[in-house]
Image (spheres, rainbow, N blue to C red):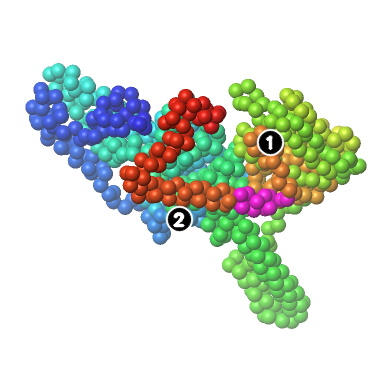
Amino acid sequence: MAQSLAATSRGASRGAPGALGSLALNTRLPYHLLPVRHQQHAALQQPRRERCCRVVARAAAPEAPASAPAAGDPRGRTGASGVGSGIKLENIAITFKNDTVLKDVSWDVKKGERVGLVGVNGAGKTTQLQIIIGALQPDSGEVIKAKENMKIAYLTQEFDVNPTRTVREEFTSAFGDQVTNAARQEEIQKALEGVGEDMDAMSALLDELQELTNQSQDLDVALIDKKIDQMMPELGFSTDDNDRLVASYSGGWQMRMCLGKILLKDPDLLLLDEPTNHLDLDAIEWLEGYLKKQEIPMVIVSHDREFLDQLCTKIVETERGVANTFKGNYTEYVKQKEERNAQQWVAWEKQQKEIARQEEMVRRLAAGANSGRASTAEKALERLRGEDTFVEKPFVPKKRAFFFPPVDQMGQVAVRIEGLTHGYDGVGVLFKDADLTIEKGERVAIIGPNGAGKSTLLKLLMGREEAQQGTVEIGNYGVTPNYFEQNQAEALDLDLNVIETLVRASPDAKLNDIKALLGKMLFSGAGMEKKVGWLSGGEKARLALAKFMLTTGTLLVLDEPTNHLDIPSKETLEEAVRTFEGSVIAVSHDRYFLRRIATRIVTVQNGKLVDYQGDYELFLEQNEEEAEKMAEKEEKQKEIVQSTIKAKSKMSKAEKAKDKKAKAKSFNTAADPAKAAKKNAKRWN
């Protein structure tokens, strides 16, 4: 039986299983349930209690339309400007320490829409989410909400779970106010039984109880267990999971708990900030499938391009403080932006030619005797440069193209793994008699669920750990590894400045080459002198990538290299890896990255390294075929079972008895029980 909320809240232990105690089932505490000696006093207090109820009713009644909020009020207006559902940002601007982060941001999201916010690190994507929830107040503009007291849910990359709770308790924690309410009502009920003849104390308790019961009606206290029972199967949990500790689940399953807690509150808007960080491919694909089924308006901040492709119906790009909206998913946004930029270039060049022609005409006319015509030409030139008609020169982001140092001579075999067996106490065996060979020029992607041993494999390859059995070797001839660890940015020396970090990493590199690389990674002249400790997370990630790219090597060993990188930085890395002449072994959950760089896929399955010749697309096709075959096999098995059940249901009693006798005979149970037991032991052992 599922653990009820009543069992998880202190003091709310009475009542039938699955209920919230007697008060939860009788939220207004009927007159006949009061202790007998208090009924007379309750009757005397009726006018006062009615007065209390009227106050509550007035508070809950629709309010008169409020006056328009002041500019920058994060609460904004409600139900205005045609916002029937979701929210609308209108002309939002905000500045931090004289740095204008947002200067003209306008977009909306409605029911059934999933908006993806994109832009480089520092463009103001998370700032927009903070403004929506009211954590930041804009300098100007407003957030217009479809209704008053809009419930906004916020799912971040850091999952808010308590590892010491059971799964049921974790879901129940979503209703903290309701749990506290139910427990307090139970305490008051007990207090009323022992209050004696103290009428003032009883009046105070009754007033508090009335307030709590009114609140509990608004909060749907009695429906909590039912909602949890409905939600858990949708998220993949069974009743067997109720009493298991949260700590025993992977990050992907903890993400499901967080998402479930949010959705249990029936939000009007769902905000997701880098939700795929730390998730494996299975968890990401599950999250995509689940979110697609929801009608809640969603706003997603993510650098996971595949995730944006799968989910988004609209992309909002923030560039230099200005937001532009594109219909469709990420791939469609890229295409539309290229087309828009091309059109803008044509319009700008045409405009520049016309401006040059008009300027030349003004000079000629002013030099002659046609001052009147010159004045007319000047006015035409002013109109051409006017704010309404002027076409801005298209913004061209700085190219970040970079290439790894050229590869000298290297042997044909880059990596050889033979008979690898390895594991940990308390975790079990990760690899058992696993084999793998990587040759020169191959780009191999290692994929699998979290905890399968992918990062461990790279540590074994780099000599950070010693294999328990078997061999893990790097090629002998000209194979030099260049290792990018999963948390490379965290290993940076915080006391060095940016340029010192690269000089120490590559003392033979020319200073001009180092500065050129930092420029491509968007570090300005002043930014190169900045202490690493003062850098943002995105800046540290770009610096770690620059440090890695300066290091020479013929074998790139990459462990989740795209974590914390913005999309332009990912594209820089992808292009550099694609043009690299040596070998690559990469662990990644970034499907877009895998599509771009991998020439071969290896999965970690049941302790083995399973090899798929071909790129990521071919791997998906092969797995889809396998999945379809398995589904067909399962469907046929179901049909066989169903037909057997139907056939049995149509058998007569005599036929059933005959069938039972035949089975008994096949196991020799009727003739010789001892012999039958021996035969059955052979069947099942």
Q: Residue at x 45, y 47 (%)?
A: 641
Nearer the observer, 109 or 389: 109
> Which x, y percent locates residue 427?
61, 26
The image quarter containing residue 334 is bottom right
Nearer the observer, 251 or 78: 251
- Give the number of callouts: 2
> Which x, y percent locates residue 494?
71, 29
Nearer the observer, 545 or 108: 545
Residue 372 covered by magenta stretch: no
- Residue 312 horizontal side relative to residue 390, left or right: left
Mark 1 crowdedness (10 Å alpha carbons): few <14, some 14-19, many ≥20: some
Instruction: Specify whether residue 82 is in view.
Output: yes
Q: Residue at x 67, y 80 (%)?
A: 372
Magenta-colored segment: predominant secondary structure = helix
What residue is disc 2 on? 112
- Residue 75 horizontal side relative to residue 280, left or right: left
The amino acid sitting under disc 1 is Lys
Q: Which residues are magenta?
A: 614-626
Which disc is residue 608 wearing?
Answer: 1
Q: Secondary structure at mark 1?
A: strand
The amino acid sitting under disc 2 is Gly
> Which x, y percent locates residue 630?
56, 48
Q: Residue at x 74, y 81 (%)?
A: 369
- Residue 470 horizontal side relative to residue 623, left or right: right
Which disc is residue 40 wearing?
Answer: none
Mark 2 crowdedness (10 Å alpha carbons): few <14, some 14-19, many ≥20: some
